[in-house]
Image (tube, grey):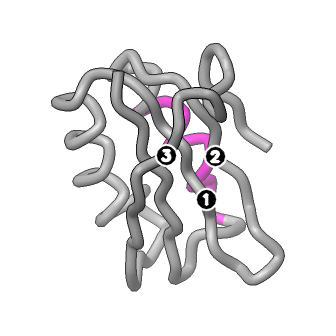
Amino acid sequence: MKCKRAWISGRVQGVAFRAYTRAQAEALGLRGHARNLPDGRVEVLACGEEHALEALLRWLEVGPPAARVDSVRVDDASADDCPPGFRVG
């Protein structure tokens, strides 16, 4: 299992970005979370098969219809940080 943490900037709060991300992640069989940050970004932690992670990361570059993604920064993450299921916080 691989894990990635992504920080998404742009118009990503107040546009159901986290809910859409959860739906995408669950459809791909990923665990993790999506949460709003105080600076206006969304943080996504996702763990699972590499091909599923790559698909989610590609989706994060676009996001849901009402969002505008300006940038996505991605780093490796530890599986120890990954909760069961996929949570929105």
Q: Is mark 2 on a helix, strand or loop?
A: strand
User: Mark 1 highlights which residue?
Assistant: 43
- Tell me whether the residue at label 1 lies in contact with that at label 2, contact meaning CB atoms closer than 8 angstroms: yes
Q: Name the residue under label 3.
A: 77
Judged by depth in the image, the label closer to the viewer, 1 or 3, is 3
Report, in whole angstroms, how far the alpha carbon at label 2 lies from the one at label 3.
14 Å
Which of the two labelled residues, at mark 1 and mark 2, occupies the earlier sequence position? 2
Q: In which quadrant is the N terminus drawn?
A: top left
Residue 78 is one of the magenta-drawn residues:
no
The residue under label 2 is which amino acid type?
Ala
Q: Which amino acid does label 1 sit on?
A: Glu
Crowd tier of the residue under label 1, counting other residues whose Cα lies within 10 Å: few below 14, some 14–19, many 20 or above: many
In the image, is 83 to the left or to the right of 6?
A: right
- Residue at mark 2: 34
Q: Are marks 1 and 3 in contact (CB under 8 Å)?
A: no
Q: How far separated are the C-alphas under marks 1 and 2?
A: 6 Å
Residue 52 position by quadrant: top left
Residue 17 included in the magenta stretch of the image: yes
Residue with the most extreme left position: 51
- Tell me the distance, in whole angstroms, between the alpha carbons under discs 1 and 3: 12 Å
- Precedes in sequence: disc 2 or disc 3: 2
